[in-house]
């Protein structure tokens, strides 16, 4: 029987067929750029790591990235989070990589998947599972068969998962690029000939996975073909790929920096960051990724280290909580728009430079349809007046002007007109707080010295605890009688240690704690102790604060108590040492409270908690309190100032380690931050002498709507929980500056503007929070003008002009507007 095909049906077939064809995107590259369906592209990407936020936060973060002018979202893939035990996988909740990539796709953005699976990333152990280290004879990142098998197994798993979901561009998905390894070029020398063989193997292995889009290798000079090498750093304008057929690509433009416990707050200015970006595109770059665009939070025990903080804010364009970090976000957005408007000339134009002397360069990208220009002034102090094709341009030191038509400057990296938002943490007025406590039951360890494993000698914490916990008890006994040659009135315990934190107990008494303040993770701890005739019990609690994540052979860095451990007696000048290292040691992994899930809402109610004799500054103590969900939808934090060190849980979910008692060094900060000159992670740092981190993100989706919640703290070192409080984060005030005839726009991020604190049109001085009027000022009552425009409004615009603010008699001085509003 013949089927009659109606014209409508044929039309339907054509539509379906062409839709499936058009959804396949061909990604390739030539010497100039990544090409998408044959067209060279300017691609601006930003890193957002899915486990560093929550599923509920993803759409908002990604949309803010899109609104900020990004084309792509980049993420690493975190092996140890996905495969916590060998061949046991976890892609649930905020580890749902497929969902994350689909969220990127839904927003209409591309994705860049840096599989690694070594990622560095200030992530625990650089993303490697500790079980991998504990396989016999394994060596990481070299031609070690077991290592390569495991790496290939995980990489293939991820690639197959993406393929199954049709997430590669060639399948119609958003993934346009993938990465194998990470910055291997920085360490390759240390691995000798095996290093080269390994990176060739990585390339072949990746290539064989047939993903249909290009693979990249960052910081890998002369990456084996077909891998594309890319640059990482604060600046990449001088970078040139070794292979002339590779485009100039920048995978990590560090938007700020990460923090260590005991470190200051990093700060990279919008002026310097945009300068770096503009110079990169001025010098032929075509792909650029911000590391990080949103840094987020190291929840649970995911922070790397040792000693990386729970906050991974990074001073990124979106702050830890997802707020716009202004002016960075807005100033970059303007730059992205300008660069996009020049896409054709930047990718197809002929590039020519004119050296104007004194570090000033004019670059022209010429096409038959028109030209685009950049004027850069890399001088760190001297502003330039540049004459070019009959026009004059004022190019401040350390800045780039962008002229999409080679005539009109539409953007200069140092001229920031986006508002500066001063973020504040305000009391959330949370009700329902009622603290109770219970001790960590440690009789078995501290008093009895009983563990789960007994062995002769001291072993590395990674080998014994397999990263199941930060905590590992090392316990032994030593019998002393009066005749022991060591016996004296002056005896001490000596521990050579690589414990990131060490708490030592002798005969049930805490004798001392040591933590690393100077980056020296290998140290000697010695404390005088009271020993008795008969049996003495020594219990050492070793605590890790994230495993190393960087450097050649970093997996071999010792952790825990590697010894020798000895007791020392002094007889006059004579020092007698008794080495206990080879003794029988009992090991116990973790703390009883963690094992019994004291922090979990299910188990907590079966346990005894007390409000009586409430202790403060007591070591190894659990505290908990109910609290009501703060109203509104601003991000919530818990201010743990007053606490020592430990881990915090909200309704049973870990929000990370806390350590507010760890202050940053007193020096190295300065009042003034000059954006000019090369940035490094110490430049412009602030909060010297203050706690490295006192605010801890409590994601709203960890909270129970309108009902009560529980905050549980494991306080390891001693602190006072009654000082803790919940806060919400919002814009406290907003400031802006503009040259004459420019317009500033102010907003309080969803709140009405409540007052004008300062405004002057003339030559105002100072900075946000401390603006002052200069010698000249407009004739009108500026405050009244600005208040009428702004107060009570969600946003307002003010023009820096005499028409609005009255003529200011400033003589030869250039006039400008400065304004600060209160939110
Ligand atoms: C790079 C590395 C990233 C991250 C960054 C510093 O070397 O590739 O993963 O660690 O440094 O934030």
Image: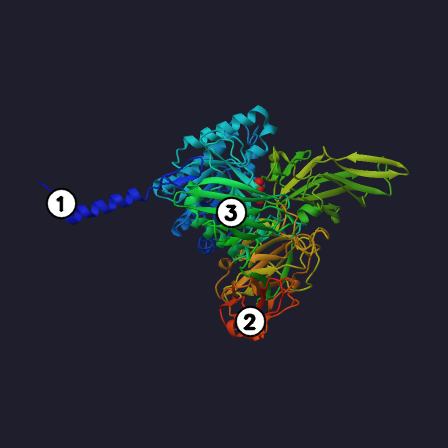
Comparing labels 1 and 2, the label whose residue is closer to the camera: 2
SS for callout 1: loop
Q: Nearer the viewer, residue 237 or 502?
A: 237
User: Cβ(mark 1) to ligand 1 < 8 Å?
Assistant: no
The reply to whether dot 3 and dot 2 touch (C-beta < 8 Å) is: no
Provide residue 64's location: percent of width, then percent of height: 46, 55
Provide residue 702's location: percent of width, then percent of height: 51, 58
Label 2 Cα neighbours within 10 Å, binned few <14 / some 14-19 / many ≥20: many
The reply to whether dot 1 and dot 3 touch (C-beta < 8 Å) is: no
Provide residue 349's location: percent of width, then percent of height: 43, 41
Sequence-wise, which precedes: disc 1 or disc 2? Answer: 1
Sequence-wise, which precedes: disc 3 or disc 2? Answer: 3
Q: Nearer the viewer, residue 430 or 593?
A: 430
3D distance between C-alphas at marks 3 and 2: 33 Å
Label 1 Cα neighbours within 10 Å, binned few <14 / some 14-19 / many ≥20: few
Q: Nearer the viewer, residue 493 or 225?
A: 225
Residue 385, disc: none
Q: Residue at x 41, y 33 (%)?
A: 209
Q: Which residue is mark 1?
A: 5
Displayed quadrant of residue 167:
top left
Residue 248 relative to residue 463: left or right: left
Q: Which residue is mark 2?
A: 805
Displayed quadrant of residue 497:
top right
Q: Quadrant of the C terminus?
A: bottom right
Q: Which residue is mark 3?
A: 374
* Residue 501 seen from this side: yes
């Amino acid at each position: 029987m013949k089927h009659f095909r109606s014209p409508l049906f044929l039309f339907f077939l054509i539509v379906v067929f062409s839709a499936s064809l058009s959804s396949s995107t061909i990604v390739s590259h030539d010497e100039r750029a990544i090409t998408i369906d044959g067209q060279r592209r300017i691609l601006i990407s930003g890193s957002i790591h899915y486990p560093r936020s929550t599923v509920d936060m993803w759409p908002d973060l990604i949309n803010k990235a899109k609104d900020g002018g990004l084309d792509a979202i980049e993420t690493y893939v975190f092996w140890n989070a996905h495969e916590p035990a060998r061949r046991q996988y976890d892609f649930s909740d905020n580890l749902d990589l497929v969902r994350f990539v689909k969220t990127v796709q839904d927003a209409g953005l591309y994705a860049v998947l840096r599989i690694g699976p070594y990622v560095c990333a200030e992530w625990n152990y650089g993303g490697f599972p500790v079980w991998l280290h504990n396989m016999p004879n394994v060596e990481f990142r070299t031609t070690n068969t077991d290592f390569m098998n495991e790496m290939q197994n995980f990489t293939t798993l991820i690639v197959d998962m993406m393929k199954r979901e049709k997430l590669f561009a060639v399948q119609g998905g958003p993934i346009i690029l993938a990465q194998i390894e990470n910055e291997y070029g920085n360490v390759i020398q240390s691995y000798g000939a095996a290093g080269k063989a390994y990176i060739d193997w990585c390339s072949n292995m990746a290539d064989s996975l047939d993903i249909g889009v290009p693979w990249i290798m960052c910081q890998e000079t002369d990456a084996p073909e077909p891998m594309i090498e890319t640059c990482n750093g604060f600046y990449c304008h001088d970078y040139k790929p070794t292979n002339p057929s590779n485009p100039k690509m920048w995978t990590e433009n560090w938007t700020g920096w990460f923090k260590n416990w005991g470190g200051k707050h990093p700060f990279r200015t919008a002026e310097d960051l945009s300068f770096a970006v503009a110079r990169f595109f001025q010098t032929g770059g075509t792909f650029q990724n911000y590391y990080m665009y949103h840094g987020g939070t190291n929840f649970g025990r995911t922070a790397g280290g040792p000693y990386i903080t729970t906050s991974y804010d990074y001073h990124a364009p979106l702050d830890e909580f997802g707020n716009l970090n202004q002016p960075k976000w807005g100033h970059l957005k303007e730059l992205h728009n300008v660069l996009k408007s020049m896409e054709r000339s930047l990718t197809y134009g002929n590039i020519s430079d004119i050296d104007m002397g004194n570090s000033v360069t004019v670059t022209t990208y010429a096409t038959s349809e028109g030209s685009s220009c950049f004027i850069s002034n890399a001088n760190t102090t001297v502003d330039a007046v540049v004459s070019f094709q009959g026009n004059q341009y004022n190019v401040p030191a350390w800045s780039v002007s962008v002229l999409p038509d080679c005539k009109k400057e539409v953007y200069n990296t140092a001229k920031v007109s986006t508002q500066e938002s001063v973020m504040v943490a305000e009391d959330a007025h949370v009700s329902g707080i009622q603290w109770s406590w219970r001790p960590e039951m440690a009789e078995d360890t501290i008093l009895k010295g009983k563990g789960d494993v007994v062995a002769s000698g001291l072993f590395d914490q990674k080998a014994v605890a397999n990263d199941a916990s930060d905590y590992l008890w090392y316990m032994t006994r030593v019998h002393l009688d009066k005749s022991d040659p060591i016996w004296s009135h002056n005896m001490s315990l000596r521990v050579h240690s690589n414990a990131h934190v060490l708490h030592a107990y002798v005969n049930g008494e805490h004798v001392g704690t040591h933590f690393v303040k100077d980056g020296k993770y290998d140290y000697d701890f010695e404390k005088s102790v009271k020993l008795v005739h008969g049996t003495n019990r020594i219990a050492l609690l070793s605590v890790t604060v994230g495993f190393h994540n960087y450097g050649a052979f970093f997996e071999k860095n010792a952790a825990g108590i590697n010894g020798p451990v000895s007791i020392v007696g002094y007889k006059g000048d004579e020092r007698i040492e008794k080495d206990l290292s080879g003794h029988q040691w009992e090991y116990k992994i973790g703390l009883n409270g963690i094992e019994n899930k004291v922090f979990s809402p299910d188990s907590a109610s079966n346990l005894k908690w007390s409000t009586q004799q409430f202790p403060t500054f007591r070591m190894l103590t659990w505290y908990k309190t109910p609290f009501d969900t703060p109203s509104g939808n601003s991000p919530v934090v818990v201010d743990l100032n007053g606490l020592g060190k430990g881990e915090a849980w909200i309704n049973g979910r870990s929000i990370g380690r806390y350590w507010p008692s760890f202050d940053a060094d007193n020096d190295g900060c300065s009042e003034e931050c000059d954006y000019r000159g090369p940035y490094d992670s110490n430049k412009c740092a602030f909060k010297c002498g203050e706690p490295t981190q006192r605010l801890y993100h409590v994601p709203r989706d960890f909270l129970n709507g309108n009902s009560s919640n529980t905050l549980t703290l494991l306080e390891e070192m001693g602190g006072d929980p009654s000082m803790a409080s919940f806060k919400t984060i919002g814009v406290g005030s907003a400031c802006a500056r503009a040259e004459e005839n420019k317009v500033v726009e102010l907003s309080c991020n969803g709140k009405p503007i409540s007052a004008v604190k300062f405004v002057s049109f003339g030559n105002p001085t100072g900075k946000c929070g401390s603006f002052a009027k200069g010698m000249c000022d407009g004739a009108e009552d500026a405050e009244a003008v600005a208040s009428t425009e702004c107060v009570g409004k969600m946003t307002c615009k003010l023009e820096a002009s005499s028409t609005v603010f009255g003529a200011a008699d400033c003589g030869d001085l250039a006039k400008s507007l400065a304004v600060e509003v209160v939110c």
